[in-house]
Amino acid sequence: MGARVTRAFRNFNLENRAHREIGKAKPLVAPRHPSHKDTTEQTPEIDKSIHKKDDPLLSLLKSVYVESKDPPAQVMKQSQAETLEDEERRPLKFSLPGDPYGMLDITDVPKGKLSIVEALTALNNHKQSPKSWTPERIAQEYSLDLKDTKALLEFFVPFNVKIKPPKTEEPKQIKAT
């Protein structure tokens, strides 16, 4: 009941109040900055200087000659192969049994990197016995940087599998009538 009374007062003489607000004078627009007028007056002088031919600059531009050539494809392939050969590599510590995802094709990895299986094994070892598998030992074992190893152990968590036991009682069902 209170809402009806407040609505009646709120809507009282609404049309007249709206016309009064619409009839008020609009606020004036702020004047333009004086520098705006100055730039429009100077445009003919600027146009003249832009379109004027400058012979010294033109002669300097004509004296510049750029020649670009791509190296042959064989040289690029050889340089990429050399960088791969120069990279230190270490043999894999662990691999998956069988050949599920083509993991057996990989026999070694670059130093400072881990395969997925090695990463999961290292994380699991650290989770099972953190005192024996310290970040320093993991970094030494897998030829990793200590800072990266600490970040790996802090931010990457292996899966936690929790198996819920089945309920002993059967769930209630609605019977069709």
Image: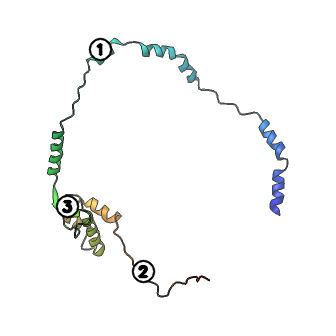
Q: What residue type is labelled 1?
A: Ser
Q: Earlier in the sequence, mark 1 or mark 3?
A: 1
Q: Which amino acid does label 2 sit on?
A: Lys
Name the quadrant containing residue 122: bottom left
Q: Which residue is drawn at 25% across and 22% down?
A: 65
How far from the left and from the top, in percent, is residue 140? Answer: 20, 64
Closer to the camera, 49 or 75?
A: 75
Closer to the camera, 78 or 128?
A: 78
Local crowd at mark 2 within 10 Å, few (<14), some, or many (≥20)?
few
Local crowd at mark 3 within 10 Å, few (<14), some, or many (≥20)?
few
Would residue 163 be found to the left or right of residue 104 on screen?
Answer: right
Q: Earlier in the sequence, mark 2 or mark 1?
A: 1
How far from the left and from the top, in percent, is residue 20? Answer: 81, 39
**Label drawn at residue 105:** 3
Closer to the camera, 13 or 32?
A: 13
Residue hosting label 2: 164
Instruction: Give the structural element (helix, strand or loop) at label 1.
Output: helix
Q: Residue at x 82, y 43 (%)?
A: 17
- 45 above or below 13? above
How far from the left and from the top, in percent, is residue 38? Answer: 55, 19
Q: Residue at x 71, y 33 (%)?
A: 27
Residue hosting label 1: 59
Name the quadrant containing residue 16: top right
Q: Residue furthest front?
A: 177
Local crowd at mark 1 within 10 Å, few (<14), some, or many (≥20)?
few
Q: What residue type is labelled 3?
A: Asp
